[in-house]
Image (spheres, helix red, strand yellow):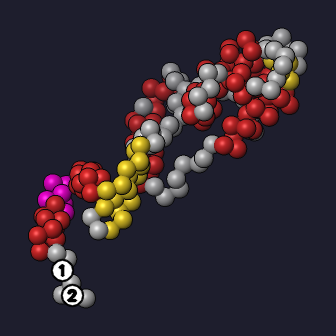
Amino acid sequence: MEDVDSIFRVADKDNSGTLSVKNIKNVLGDIYQRYPQVELYLKTNQMKGFHDLLKDKETEELNIEEFKKALAQVDSQVKMLPATAQQVAAQEGAYLADCFNRMNTCEENPEGPLRIRGAGRHRFKPFRYRHLGQFAPLGGEQTAAQLPGDWVHVGHSTQWLWYSVYASKQFSWRTRMLVVTDWGRRFFFGRDSSSL
């Protein structure tokens, strides 16, 4: 929301103080690239374009207050990334490592979106989080799973899916084998309660 005035000025090429749908379409690609949450919001709500945010608008022209209102609607609905999630941290780490590895190349040939404030482009494309799903063990050999596409399932089959994902995320083959053999031992002999 801090960049709304700057975005509006970039889109308003004729300095009329209003934007037409055509003006917005000209900068929409840059808005999507710089602020991926706008595109994500439109897709999630099955909207075809930015003009769908303006359903109650009769005219084709849009002033800055109406533009702010439309973007504020997006901003209020978009959820932040999970703060302590391992998936987010792993993806951010891979993104950051990639940026460090390509720093010199991207200094000469920036690949990011246009700078809304100032000239030129940002060095790197912005980080985009890909939600891979969540698992919650429920006990009794059952797990709840929420996977991309809002697919939700609870049961024993989901427990086996969770086992396979958990084992595949281990860092070494040794650790994977220890985890799998521990599960196998528990499955056949029950939990070890002698140390309690």
Residue 75: x and y, percent? 69, 40
**Magenta residues?**
172-179
Query: Magenta stretch: residue 56 in it?
Result: no
Residue at (26%, 52%) from the top-left corner? 157
Q: Which sits in the foreground, 42 or 115? A: 42
C-beta proximity under 8 Å, tags 2 and 1: yes
Q: Which sits in the foreground, 31 or 57? A: 57
- Left or right: residue 196 compared with residue 30: left
Residue 176: x and y, percent? 18, 57
Query: Magenta stretch: residue 178 in it?
Result: yes
- Left or right: residue 193 compared with residue 153: left
Residue at (58%, 28%) from the top-left corner? 46
Tell me if residue 37 can be seen. Answer: yes
Tell me the tag on residue 165: none
Quadrant that contains the C terminus: bottom left
Question: Is 167 situated above or below 47?
Answer: below
Q: Secondary structure at mark 1?
A: loop
Residue assigned mark 2: 195
Overall secondary structure of the magenta section: helix
Residue assigned mark 1: 192
Residue at (70%, 24%) from the top-left corner? 52
Task: Find residue 31 and report its image quarter.
Answer: top right
